[in-house]
Image (cartoon, rainbow, N blue to C red):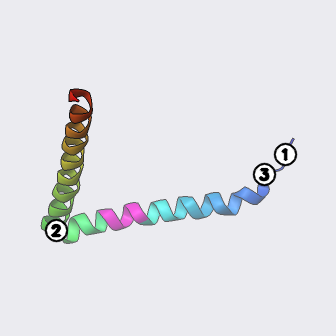
């Protein structure tokens, strides 16, 4: 068996950073809801634009 005790500090750090990120998101949502909504809208707008462009790219590949 391999002793993986050297991984424990890294896993704890990852868990703490995850909790801090979640806490920051919750804090941001409660303190600036309009800006949070705009950020979410921008992210989903970017994903939508990327998906549309990817679809257009593959359509142009198949069409030729």
Task: Mark 1 and mark 3 in contact? Answer it, CB < 8 Å.
Answer: yes
State the quadrant of the N terminus: top right
Segment colored magenta: 21-25
Percent across and percent down for residue 25 are: 32, 63
Give the residue displayed 18% in from the left and 58% down from the top.
42
**Disc 1 target residue:** 2
Give the residue displayed 20% in from the left and 62% down from the top.
39
**Disc 3 target residue:** 4
Q: Estimate the spatial distance between the alpha carbons at disc 1 and disc 3, rounded to whole Å.
A: 6 Å
Of the residues under marks 2 and 1, which one precedes in the sequence? 1
Give the residue displayed 35% in from the left and 68% down from the top.
24
**Disc 2 target residue:** 35
Q: Estimate the spatial distance between the alpha carbons at disc 2 and disc 1, rounded to whole Å.
A: 48 Å
Neighbor class of circle 2 (other Cα within 10 Å; few <14, some 14-19, many 20+) is: few
Give the residue displayed 18% in from the left and 70% down from the top.
32
Percent across and percent down for residue 19 are: 46, 61
Report whether 58 appears left or right of 12: left
Report whether 18 appears left or right of 25: right
Taking 60 as reference, is 36 above or below it?
below
Question: Tag 2, which secondary structure?
Answer: helix
């Amino acid at each position: 068996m391999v002793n993986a005790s050297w991984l424990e500090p890294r896993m704890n750090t990852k868990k703490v950073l995850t909790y801090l990120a979640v806490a920051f998101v919750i804090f941001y949502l409660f303190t600036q809801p309009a800006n949070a909504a705009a950020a979410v809208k921008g992210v989903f707008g970017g994903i939508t634009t990327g998906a549309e462009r990817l679809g257009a790219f593959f359509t142009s590949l198949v069409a030729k």
